[in-house]
């Protein structure tokens, strides 16, 4: 279920509200493509045979791959009517807490943590946790910022 807000001006009333997205499989093909794109071809990401004998027992997603999936994982979790556009404003803190093995599934849980009115619109701070299916600890926790421009 998503958080639905009537207008950007009403965002402050939503502090503390949260929503959880759908599961997404992080397969080896995606991991390999990310390795090629970023030129980070460390064996823990791309060499299944060597990784099977390594510390994680399988290849794992790059932490930055998991982070880069946040726009997809959080899409639709916060809907604000009367918004012309939303832009990524940055990150205040990111922690990679657990590896994401190839073939596992992740999803995002996001909570509105802060709202600040600016000259351009509303800067919204969110705490987003990337859950790893079947794991007791999350894969990643990030404090993200987005700027909502009123229509």
Image (cartoon, rainbow, N blue to C red):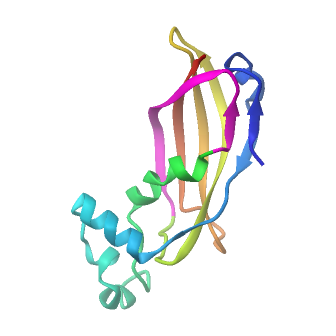
Residue 83, percent across and down? 62, 23
Along the line of sight, the residue nearer the viewer: 81 or 39: 81
Question: Residue at the location (51% across, 61% down)?
Answer: 97
Q: Quadrant of the C terminus?
A: top right
Find out whether residue 26 is within the magenta segment: no
Q: How many marks?
A: 0
Q: Is residue 73 left or right of residue 33?
A: right
Residue 96, percent across and down? 47, 57
Furthest residue in direction top, as rendered: 119
Furthest residue in direction left, as rendered: 39
Residue 29, percent across and down? 39, 74
Residue 85, percent across and down? 54, 26
Q: Quadrant of residue 60?
A: bottom left
Q: Can residue 16 be seen in this snapshot?
A: no
Per the rendered image, the range of residues in magenta is 76-97
Question: Residue at the location (51% across, 47% down)?
Answer: 71
Question: Residue at the location (65% across, 45% down)?
Answer: 110
Secondary structure predominantly adopted by residues drawn in magenta: strand
Q: Is residue 108 above or below residue 18?
A: below
Question: Residue at the location (46% across, 37% down)?
Answer: 91
Find out whether residue 86 is within the magenta segment: yes
Q: Can residue 67 be seen in this snapshot?
A: yes
Q: Is residue 10 above or below residue 79?
A: above
Q: Is residue 62 above or below residue 2?
A: below
Q: Quadrant of residue 33?
A: bottom left
Along the line of sight, the residue nearer the viewer: 13 or 24: 24
């Amino acid at each position: 279920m998503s958080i639905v807000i009537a207008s950007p001006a009403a965002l402050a009333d939503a502090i503390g509200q949260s929503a959880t997205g759908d599961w997404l499989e992080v397969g080896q093909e995606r991991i390999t493509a990310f390795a090629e794109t970023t030129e980070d071809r460390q064996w823990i990401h791309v060499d299944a045979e060597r990784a099977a004998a390594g510390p994680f027992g399988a290849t794992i997603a790059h932490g930055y791959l998991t982070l880069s999936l946040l726009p997809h994982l959080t899409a639709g979790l916060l809907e604000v009517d009367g918004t012309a556009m939303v832009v990524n404003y940055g990150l205040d803190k990111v922690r990679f807490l657990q590896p994401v093995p190839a073939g596992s599934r992740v999803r995002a849980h996001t909570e509105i943590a802060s709202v600040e009115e600016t000259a351009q619109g509303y800067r919204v701070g969110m705490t987003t946790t990337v859950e790893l299916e079947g794991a007791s600890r999350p894969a990643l926790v990030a404090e993200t910022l987005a700027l909502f421009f009123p229509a």
